[in-house]
Amino acid sequence: MKLYVILFTLILLIGFCTSTNQLHARRSLQDYVDSFVNTGKIQLRGGVLKLNDTVIRQIWSFFKAKYRRIYSSNRQEGERLRIFVRHLKYVLKSNFKKTRTYQLGLNQFSDWTLAEFDALKKGLKVSRSLARFYQRHYHARRLKRNLQKHRYNDRRFSDNWFDKVLNQDQHNNDTSSLPKTFDWRTKTVVSPIKSQGGCGSCYAFASVAVLESVYAIKTNSKNVTEFSPQQIVDCSNNGNSGCYGGLFQPTIEYFKEKGGKIATDASYPYVGRTDESCRKDGINEIDLGQIEYIDIPVGDEKQMAEVLINNGPIFIGLDADSELFMFYKSGVLKIDNCPNDREDMDHAMVIVGYGYDEKLKLPYWILKNSWGVKWGESGYLRLIKDADNMCGIATMASYAKLT
């Protein structure tokens, strides 16, 4: 009889744990937090957040169970709990603002410091030499306009010299004929959202995403061939640094040196480490053809829209050094005083479309990220468009052309 009682108790416990785990899997952390807001257990009164320890412990327990956090000691858990509570209060205070255009949400990064997040989830590396190049690029455009305006002739500033420095196509900035909204995702040329894991390889994922799309457009394919970011991490080391950051331009130069050949993701899968040697054998490579990269003039969001429609998705850099990026959940992100200098760019994403939010009365860019489908709007971000180069979205914009 005792044996039956013990077995019955074990079955109940297993069933309870299973149902609890399933509940955690289905319900987002922020939804759980919002349940306390909706029942009045979390309030904001006079700018002061009312949040008791019991509620914090419940939310913390939910977070640990959902993301399977196990800490090595009570001291370590205490440190992570303090980080978590700071983020919890930040997200709550932001979401209580009635004028906000976006929603934040606690997620799998909620017990990370911002410095840890920067190191592990970004990876756009802007060296001083590249920053100087972009500065020269900008001044070269201004100088050419001034010389043409004043009809000044100097062999040092020939058209060939300017064309070499600018390295870009000329576009008509009249965007009156462009559609109000556009989204490459509806054309079946955008691959699924992926996660870079704990590797600073955003540049590799963004580069691959651009090449996947322009190749699908070029070949008029109904299915996207997914390319390998790991090949870039392992092999494109002339200007890139594996999991420690890189850029679009040296990545494209690497594939140009390879004759336009790029490995498929299936044959060269992502492992998110830099200790892998560059694989040569046993991989399936696609011939992209002739490949070039072209930089869009700094700050020119109108030309970005034109290039997006006429050529395909665009590689961009952002200053994502904010908890607003870390905990973005939905809506149109709009950040006061967000830097847009080249030296501040620290994360790469891909523009796949743009639109207009009728409720908020705001235009926005649609950005594909590499932080997994549980971040943002199923892995995507909407960032305000035509707002003085918000967070540098038009500071390092580049695209690829395949012929």
Image (spheres, rainbow, N blue to C red):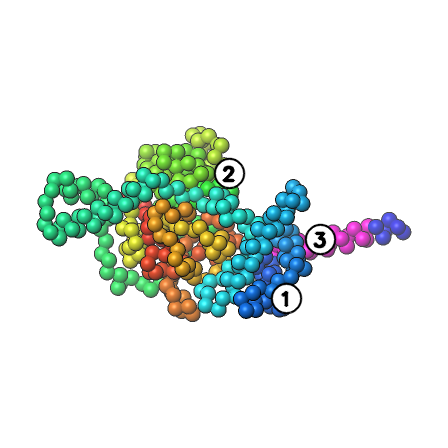
Q: How many marks?
A: 3
Indicate left or right for 296 with 191 as reference: left
Say which quarter of the image contains residue 385.
bottom left
Question: Marks 1 and 3, how far apart in space?
Answer: 26 Å
Q: Amino acid at mark 1?
A: Lys
- Mark 1: few, some, or many residues within 10 Å (few <14, many ≥20)? some
Res. 255 mark: none
Q: Which residue is mark 1?
A: 41
Question: Marks 1 and 2, how far apart in space?
Answer: 43 Å
In which quadrant will I find the C terminus?
Answer: top left
Q: Which residue is at the front of the view, 76 or 175? A: 76
Q: Which residues are magenta?
A: 7-26
- Mark 3: few, some, or many residues within 10 Å (few <14, many ≥20)? few
Q: Mostly what secondary structure, the magenta segment?
A: helix
Q: Which residue is mark 3?
A: 17
- The residue positioned 51% from the left and 42% from the top of the image is 198
What secondary structure is found at the residue carrying circle 3?
helix
- The residue positioned 83% from the left and 50% from the top of the image is 6
Q: Which residue is at the front of the view, 88 or 295? A: 88
- The residue positioned 26% from the left and 64% from the top of the image is 176
- The residue positioned 33% from the left and 58% from the top of the image is 388
Q: Which residue is at the front of the view, 348 or 217? A: 348
Nearer the N terminus, badge 1 or badge 2? 1
Say which quarter of the image contains residue 231.
top left
Res. 271 mark: 2
Q: Amino acid at mark 2?
A: Val
Q: Position of residue 175 (x, y in %)?
A: 26, 61
Indicate left or right for 49 with 347 as reference: right
Q: Between tags 1 and 3, which lies in front?
A: 1
What secondary structure is found at the residue carrying circle 1?
loop
Q: Amino acid at mark 3?
A: Cys
